[in-house]
Image: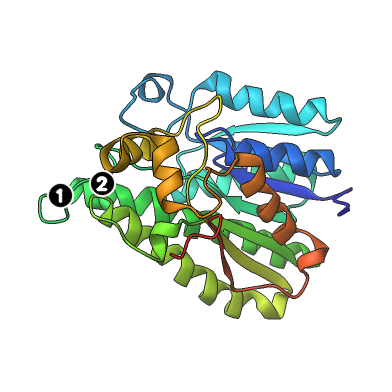
Amino acid sequence: MSDFTGKVAWIAGAARPPGIGRAVAVQLARLGADVACVDVVDDEAAADPNQAYAVTTAALEATAEAVRAEGRRALVSHVDLTDEHAVNKSVALTVSEFGRIDIGCNLSGGTGPALGNGPLLDLEFDGWRTALDINLTAAWLGSRACARQMIEQGGGGAIISLSSSAAIAGAAGVGAFSAARAGVNRLTEVLATELGPHNIRVNAVCPRGIAPGAVGNPGLERRAERDSGGLEEWARQTIPLGRLQSADETAAVVVFLASDAASFVSGQSIVVAGGAHV
């Protein structure tokens, strides 16, 4: 079992649906890491069922409490992840509280009618720009800020970003999201090349379909209803294992990539898709 005792993780998207960030935070804490729980907090926007990006204050606090329940320290940081100054400030705050950053996780992003969904020919410019900002630019900003800190403190580190199976096989109606997540995969490859000499490993995870669980998965639920009449049928039709994946199953891959067990894994976008060919 991996040991993260003495390590510090900065996790963006720590509370957003469908719960990957929270699962990563808890698993890392259980293995000894202190965690900065970072997310886009907007209580009013989080109540909108047409978006899966902003989270409530209570949801982010709940992630921090789950980390503390594992006996580790937690820091809560409300951040506009598309604002470079806000991201840099969050990283600096983490270092001032915990002394360092060893693991950077960019697990935010989202889809929805207001976040770039729809046929590309009908998409408004603002929707396109929003999709790229929240699903690609945020990953670059988080990676850059964490990597700069890792280089300054020395000793290497690991950066993991959330991508998607849609980055590998685009789907109608989510073209902007697919393009943005494909950018995350290319970003991962280039950062791995540039940061390798500093012993910083950079990888991405590409899940297929996360079960809604207690926090929901609005984007997947809309797509499954449109394409197959519901989540269970969508999973049966598109995933050979015949079911959706849990947030914990996806988080386990992120934690592996952050661990010494993956010490020679870098520049990879790992598909976690239950056997689906994407």
Where residue 175 sits in the image (x, y, percent)?
A: 26, 56
Q: Amino acid at mark 1?
A: Leu
Q: Is residue 150 above or below residue 129?
A: below
The kind of secondary structure element at disc 2 is loop
Which residue lies under the disc numbered 1?
Answer: 123
Where residue 59 sits in the image (x, y, percent)?
A: 56, 23
Q: Nearer the viewer, residue 18 or 96?
A: 18
Which residue lies under the disc numbered 2?
Answer: 116
Where residue 32 sits in the image (x, y, percent)?
A: 86, 43
Q: Residue furthest left?
A: 122
Q: Nearer the viewer, residue 3 or 86?
A: 3
Nearest to N terminus: mark 1 or mark 2: 2
User: In the displayed structure, does residue 223 sit left or right of residue 200?
Assistant: left
User: In the displayed structure, does residue 30 sit left or right of residue 130?
Assistant: right
Can residue 82 be spotted in the picture?
no
Q: Nearer the viewer, residue 250 or 39?
A: 250
Where residue 134 sits in the image (x, y, percent)?
A: 39, 48
Crowding at dot 2, Cα within 10 Å, few <14 / some 14-19 / many 20+, comes out as many
Q: Is residue 75 above or below residue 273?
A: above
Q: Are marks 1 and 2 in contact (CB under 8 Å)?
A: yes
The kind of secondary structure element at disc 1 is loop
* Residue appearing at x 49%, y 22% in the figure: 56
* Residue appearing at x 76%, y 67% in the figure: 262
User: In the displayed structure, does residue 168 sit left or right of residue 272?
Assistant: left
Disc ID at residue 275: none
Can residue 268 be spotted in the picture?
yes
Crowding at dot 1, Cα within 10 Å, few <14 / some 14-19 / many 20+, comes out as some
Give the alpha-carbon distance from disc 1 to disc 2, as whole Å.
7 Å
